[in-house]
Image (cartoon, rainbow, N blue to C red):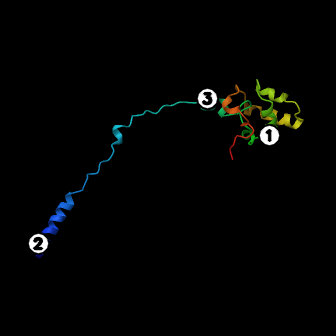
Amino acid sequence: MKNLFRLLAVIALIIGSFWGKVPAQALNLTSIALPSLPVAVLNAADAKLTTEFGAKIDLNNSDIRDFRDLRGFYPNLAGKIIKNAPYEEVEDVLNIPGLSDTQKERLQANLEKFTVTEPSKEFIEGDDRFNPGVY
């Protein structure tokens, strides 16, 4: 009787080890993935940054935070500059109505740090020039 139980146990183990096993199949993603090449595409804002706009403060497109590094500009004088934009030339900023003599002197001393380019909707739409949303 012991031998019969041993034989049944061995048969059950053999059948159980082969029966019910399904080989694992992984999804081969390399066969369905399309090869891609890196594409260098500049949007309008990135293209603008490759000009003088990226190196100097653009009086027509910069936001108020760009004037923080200039002593005495942020926020009052910078706000006046932005409100009176657009400008044709950098020197036009000296013709802003209501400037004090001190403000005119500050502008005159920093004219080489400014540039003027065509106003770009990517930079001036809405109130982003006064509150660019960078906190």
- Percent from the top left, x then y, of residue 119? 71, 27
Query: Which label is found at residue 102?
Result: none
Mark 1 lies on residue? 73
Foreground mark, 1 or 3, reads 3
Residue at the far front in the pictured view: 1
Badge 1: how crowded within 10 Å, few (<14), some, or many (20+)?
some
36 and 107: which one is in front?
36
| Viewport quadrant of the N terminus | bottom left
Tell me how far mark 1 sits from mark 2, CA to CA: 99 Å
Foreground mark, 1 or 2, reads 2
Foreground mark, 3 or 2, reads 2
The picture quadrant where one finds residue 20 is: bottom left
The secondary element bearing badge 2 is classed as helix
| Residue type, mark 1 in image | Phe
- Percent from the top left, x then y, of residue 76? 82, 40
Tell me how far mark 1 sits from mark 3, CA to CA: 28 Å
Name the N-terminal-most of marks 3 and 2.
2
- Percent from the top left, x then y, of residue 23? 26, 51
65 and 3: which one is in front?
3
Q: Residue at image x 29%, y 51%?
A: 24
| Residue type, mark 3 in image | Ala
- Percent from the top left, x then y, of residue 53? 67, 31
Mark 2 lies on residue? 4
Q: As displayed, is residue 76 above or below residue 19?
A: above
The picture quadrant where one finds residue 45 is: top right
The secondary element bearing badge 3 is classed as helix
Residue at the far top in the pictured view: 88
Mark 3 lies on residue? 44
Name the N-terminal-most of marks 1 and 2.
2
Tell me how far mark 3 sits from mark 2, CA to CA: 85 Å
| Residue type, mark 2 in image | Leu
